[in-house]
Image (cartoon, helix red, strand yellow):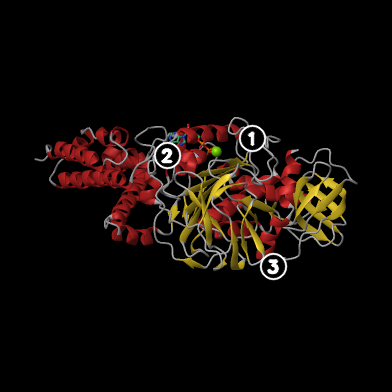
Amino acid sequence: MALKGWARAQAGPQATAPGAASGRIESPVTVEGTIVRVNGPMVEIEGLAGVSLADLVEVGPGRLPGEVTGIRGAIMTAQVYEYTGGLRVGDQATSDRQPLSVRLGPGLIGGVFDGLLRPLARAPDFLSPGAFAGTAAHGSEAEFRPSGRVGSLVSGGAVLGRVRESLAIDQAIQVPPGIAGELRHLALAGRYAPDAVIAQVADVDVRLSSLWPVRRPRPFAERLDLEAPLATGQRVLDLFFPLTRGSTAAVPGGFGTGKTILLEQIAKWCDADVIVYVGCGERGNEMSDALSELRELVDPRTGRPLLERTVIIANTSNMPVMARELSIYTGITVAEFYRDMGFDAVVIADSTSRWAEALRESASRTGALPVEEGYPAELPSQLAAFYERAGRLRTLGGGDATVSIIASVSPPGGDKTEPVTSHTRRFVRTYWSLDRDLAAARHYPSVSWRDSFARDASRLGVWHAANGDPNWLGRRGQAMAILAQADRLQSVAELIGAASLPDPERVVLLTARLLHEAVLQQSAVSNNDAYCAPAKQAALLDLVLAVHARCLDLVGQGVHASELEEVDLSGAARARDEVGRDDAAAVGTIRDSILGRLAGLAP
Ligand SMILES: Nc1ncnc2c1ncn2[C@@H]1O[C@H](COP(=O)(O)OP(=O)(O)O)[C@@H](O)[C@H]1O
Ligand SMILES: [Mg+2]
């Protein structure tokens, strides 16, 4: 059976790899206990001698996987990641006293997995429980190309060889963290099963894939300063609220404000090497749609299917609730695995609110003291610990690599003062707040320029200046000032009528409208607009600012604002769609023709 197959993967000598890293060097001994209480997904077990928090347990005849979340005397509580219906008091439970781990190795790229990183069969058409492919070590045999030297001294992070996962990802097979010594044996080039031993370091066997405990951040050499942007191809993000590579962003927004679409856009177009997309508690059919779409899309940088750089973890709303909690950590662990090979990885999670609901459910069933709206007291520290796993790092292997985290928050009723949103806001560096009114007006992406923030904007201005765009920060500051001024003027205009405003202020309103239509709005379904290259982004914003300057100039020369408002500026908004994704020159031509038309008004 599927579950047994998975359970077997946890046993055997390969389970010592993470054990060695964690200092738990005893070889696994299976202990047995008895279920004394079943409370939904929480199961109480008596008699599992010597197990620790976060250890894997298997309960009942189906050997359902669970994790120890509480120990009181001889009774321990396990959170079970499968449906517990049919489980009975008196059923047996076993544990190898090893932390709950996932198998990391070849075969992840392009795949779809559940919260325990078990392959989901028949995805994307059938994202439902019980559909596990059930191979202990997933993936077929992989072609291993050795590159280490037998007899040399190696330690965690050292590259022993490579396996090509896709054209974009040539995966390094590395010495797992915590293992060091003489490389005594290295397998010859050839095809190997995922759990085949491919090297021996001191007296530890290193396999093609190895286990890692999901709750434990993978070690690195040192943290590095954040410097470069993670370009998303979405103008409102890259121009106004940019994210640094290795940093964190949250996307809070009520139902239907466009969180999932925005996250999918980022998954498709951001310039990272590896995307780990965690669908956590959201609708399964959306996930299936997204998957089929990813299959067809081509990465503009490599010309290959985008799926070839993507790992998908699906714990949709129709799957066991507790596994949502785990899937977030599984996603980060997979991203860290690729980071350790030197890649820039991004974790995209939709939604952390569903994850927090799982926390709340487990807390309420174990009688933990609820603090805010039923959430346990450790909600803030859990959120902080999650976002802390992002970063730009020097890896154990000496590489410079990043994990960025982008996660949505779905506050009930869109109320952003609720606990998950407000705590998240404190921990992230970038905040893309989705606005209900903008979404209702079909202004997409509905990222609010009032409530959003990017703590690293000035730092990124320095990066842009050093990388050929000295005007980046100035352009942003000017546009933000126009948007803020227009918002203030708008409320005045509603009282006294826009026609009563002084001409220069009417120009501000005109420019802000142009900013909305030509820059901030971006269609996820237009071939040319879905992704906007940095040069075209800058050209569009330059166009609007040039029109602004020209209009102010004309008003100064005595031209009436009403005359300016008559001029057809729609070419600017159409440029988004009609001009190629990176055709800044064509945008420049449109700018010149608009400026020419305006110049014709000069007295
Ligand atoms: N960038 C966009 N371009 C076009 N339509 C969008 C865009 N963003 C959102 N939408 C529209 O809004 C709807 C709801 O978006 P969705 O991401 O599912 O919301 P949420 O995840 O916040 O509930 C989508 O079905 C789509 O019609
Ligand atoms: Mg959604």
Residue at 49% across / 36% down in the picture? 294
- Residue 595 visible, this angle: yes
How far is mark 1 from mark 3, CA to CA?
35 Å
- Which of the four quarters of the rendered structure image does ligand 2 lie in? top right
Beta carbon at label 1 within 8 Å of ligand 2: no
Q: Is 468 left, or right, of 434 in this rendering?
A: left
Counting residues from the N terminus, which is met first, the one under dot 1 or under dot 3?
Answer: 3
Q: Which residue carries the number 2 mark?
A: 304
Q: Residues within 10 Å of mark 3 (few under 14, many from 20)?
A: few
Three-letter amino acid code of the residue under disc 2: Arg
Nearest to the observer: residue 43 or residue 59: 59
Q: Which amino acid does label 1 sit on?
A: Ala
- Name the kind of residue labelled 3 in the image: Gly
The residue lying at 62 percent from left, 32 percent from top is: 122
For residue 582, side relative to residue 21 (left or right): left
Q: Mark 1 points at which residue?
A: 121
At which x and y percent is residue 42?
78, 48
Q: In this view, does 369 lie to the left or right of 598?
A: right
> Please, is residue 330 above or below residue 578 in the view?
below
Label whose residue precedes the other's in the sequence (2 or 3) = 3
Task: Kindly indicate whether the residue at mark 3 contacts the one at mark 1 (C-beta within 8 angstroms).
Answer: no
Per the model, the C-alpha gap separating discs 2 and 1 is 24 Å
SS at mark 1? loop
Residue under pointer 3: 23
The reply to whether the C-beta atoms of the residues labelled 2 and 3 are less than 8 Å apart is no
Residue located 42% across and 39% down the image = 304
Secondary structure state at the residue bearing disc 3: loop
Q: Nearer the viewer, residue 559 or 498?
A: 559
Disc 2 within 8 angstroms of ligand 1 (CB): no
Residue 350 visible in rendering: no
Q: How far apart are marks 2 and 3 (CA)?
A: 42 Å
